[in-house]
């Protein structure tokens, strides 16, 4: 009976770890947009379970969520699967990214004023 519980606990941990990394990357994109006075974007590739951070149109970082778990899936409700942070720190739109691993779900929320948090 312990093995199914440990498996579920591991899936939950992996979803949370990926969520925390996404929050860190979104916050870093926002801070760099302000510091460098340029737009930074995060584009979600839900088909391949990854996201890319870009300065303008130049990619600077891509994270594959399969590094956390092969069962981890990524969904989002951003128009064009993208959020952009402006030089004043605001987000181009509010939205939620959902990370799911075998029933364990972590949601990362971006607010219009650029706030980012795990729900």
Image (spheres, rainbow, N blue to C red):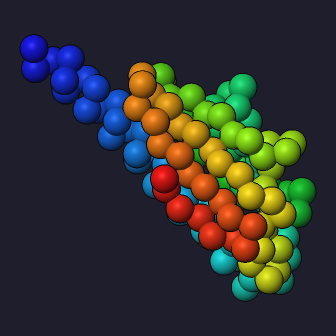
Residue at 33 percent of width and 40 percent of height: 13
Query: Viewer-proximal residue, 40 or 6?
Result: 6
Q: Which residue lies most toward the left here?
A: 1
Q: Is residue 39 left or right of residue 32?
A: right
For residue 79, say whether it is visible: yes
Residue at 59 percent of width and 64 percent of height: 116
Please tell me in which quadrant of the rendered image residue 93 appears.
bottom right
Q: Which residue lies most toward the right here?
A: 57
Residue at 47 percent of width and 43 percent of height: 106
| Residue 27 placement (x, y as % from top left) | 60, 68
For the image shown, how many numbered marks are present on the structure?
A: 0
Residue at 83 percent of width and 63 percent of height: 92
Q: Is residue 104 left or right of residue 82?
A: left
| Residue 12 placement (x, y as % from top left) | 34, 36
Q: Which residue lies most toward the top here?
A: 1
For residue 64, say whether it is visible: no
Q: Is residue 48 left or right of residue 101?
A: right
Vertical relation: 60 (above or below) 87: above
Q: Is residue 6 left or right of residue 89?
A: left
| Viewport quadrant of the N terminus | top left
Please tell me in which quadrant of the rendered image residue 10 appears.
top left
| Residue 82 placement (x, y as % from top left) | 80, 49
Query: Viewer-proximal residue, 80 or 28?
Result: 80
């Amino acid at each position: 009976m312990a093995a199914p519980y440990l498996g579920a606990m591991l899936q939950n941990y992996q979803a949370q770890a990926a969520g925390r990394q996404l929050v860190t990357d979104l916050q870093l994109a926002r801070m760099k947009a302000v510091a460098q006075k340029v737009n930074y974007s995060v584009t979600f590739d839900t088909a391949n379970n990854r996201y890319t951070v870009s300065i303008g149109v130049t990619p600077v970082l891509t994270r594959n969520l399969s590094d956390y778990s092969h069962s981890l899936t990524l969904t989002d409700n951003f128009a064009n699967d993208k959020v952009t942070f402006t030089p004043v720190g605001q987000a181009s739109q509010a939205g939620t990214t959902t990370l799911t691993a075998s029933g364990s779900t972590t949601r990362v929320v971006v607010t219009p004023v650029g706030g980012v948090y795990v729900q």
